[in-house]
Amino acid sequence: MSGEDSTNSVTDQHAYDEFCQLLSTACGIILGGNKQYLVNSRLNKLMHDNGIGSLAELVKRLQQYPESKLYVSVVDAMTTNETSWFRDYYPYDFLAKTLLPEMSTANKELRIWSAAASSGQEPYSISIIIDEYQKNKKGFINPAKIIATDISQTVLSDAREGVFDQMTLDRGMSQTRINRYFEPHGKMWKMKNEIKQRITFREFNLLGNYATLGKFDVIFCRNVLIYFSTEIKKDILSRIAGVLNPRGYLILGGSESMANYSERFDVVRLKNGLVYQLKE
Ligand SMILES: C[S@@+](CC[C@H](N)C(=O)[O-])C[C@H]1O[C@@H](n2cnc3c(N)ncnc32)[C@H](O)[C@@H]1O
């Protein structure tokens, strides 16, 4: 290796480390070593469009302008937004068979938070379950509100629009539900208003200030904690505990667990998974 090559690779490693630090401070996502290929593939176009020739230059710009549009776009591009309808099914079964009947006995509005909502499949699935429950019980349930948040403006704007192609629907939406809850929209399908109207979409960083959110009976925080460090996971779980109503439920992703991160929750074991309930 020539002297110049060696200097470049050291510089690149330094820029990569700085970038990882910036990203973790901005949104909690930990990249770990050797994810340069991921950074390249996710930021290539954005850097090109902004006339930025290297990761070192990008880092410099981000450090100079932490409030900039560029900063927001970089964080957005680094998020992984994989999702599907009724993902893992057990949370939705639990919602329909246990949670809604339990909550219906309390005479108040039900508040649910979908805390990493991605393109909307999660909050829409929740809203569909509530609709089905209300229809089966002939309207016997209190009004329900779903707050759907994500840090990525791109996926949030897709979620808000509520228009999906057939391939996306094929990932968990049955034909019966398509017929009932969607209307044709050119070659796509648009979610009906009766399902949308229960949901408020809002940009929110899980590292941010929870004081403006209000309190919730149920929180879906699924498949996002896996991207964070142990310290950040602990911190988020403690903030989540702070915005849950007494004996409220927290539903994590199918492969995520509370481990020793928080002692404020009881484990509720279901047939196909776990959910957590805030201790008294
Ligand atoms: C893999 S998706 C999970 C979507 C959905 N909850 C599910 O389980 O199907 C993770 C989502 O978390 C969001 N995210 C990542 N970091 C975040 C943060 N600090 N605050 C809020 N959302 C974040 C991403 O933008 C992405 O849409």
Image (tube, helix red, strand yellow):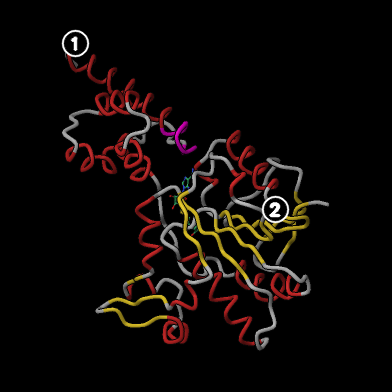
Q: Which residue is drawn at 38% across and 69% down?
A: 162
Q: To which quarter of the image does residue 137 belong?
A: bottom right
Residue under numbered circle 2: 244
Left or right side of 128 for 267: right
Q: Which amino acid does label 1 sit on?
A: Gly
Give x and y (percent) for residue 55. 26, 28
- The foreground one among 199 and 75 is 199
Secondary structure type for disc 2: strand
- The foreground one among 250 and 160 is 160
For label 1, count other residues whose C-alpha is less than 10 Å away and answer few (under 14), some (14-19) or many (20+).
Answer: few
Residue under numbered circle 1: 3
Q: Do the residues labelled 2 and 1 touch (CB within 8 Å)?
A: no
Q: To which quarter of the image does residue 161 belong?
A: bottom left
Q: What residue type is labelled 2?
A: Leu
Q: Is the CB atom of the residue marked by disc 1 within 8 angstroms of ligand 1's nearest atom?
A: no
Q: Is residue 271 magenta?
A: no
| Residue 105 in the image: above or below residue 154 | below
Left or right side of 26 for 258: right
Alpha carbon separation for disc pair 2 and 1: 57 Å
Q: Which residue is drawn at 27% across and 29% down?
A: 58
Q: Which residue is drawn at 41% across and 33% down?
A: 23
Q: Does the magenta stretch include residue 24?
A: yes
Q: Residue at x 28, y 18 (%)?
A: 11
Give x and y (percent) for residue 1. 19, 16
Q: Give the range drawn in magenta.
A: 23-29
Left or right side of 36 for 260: right
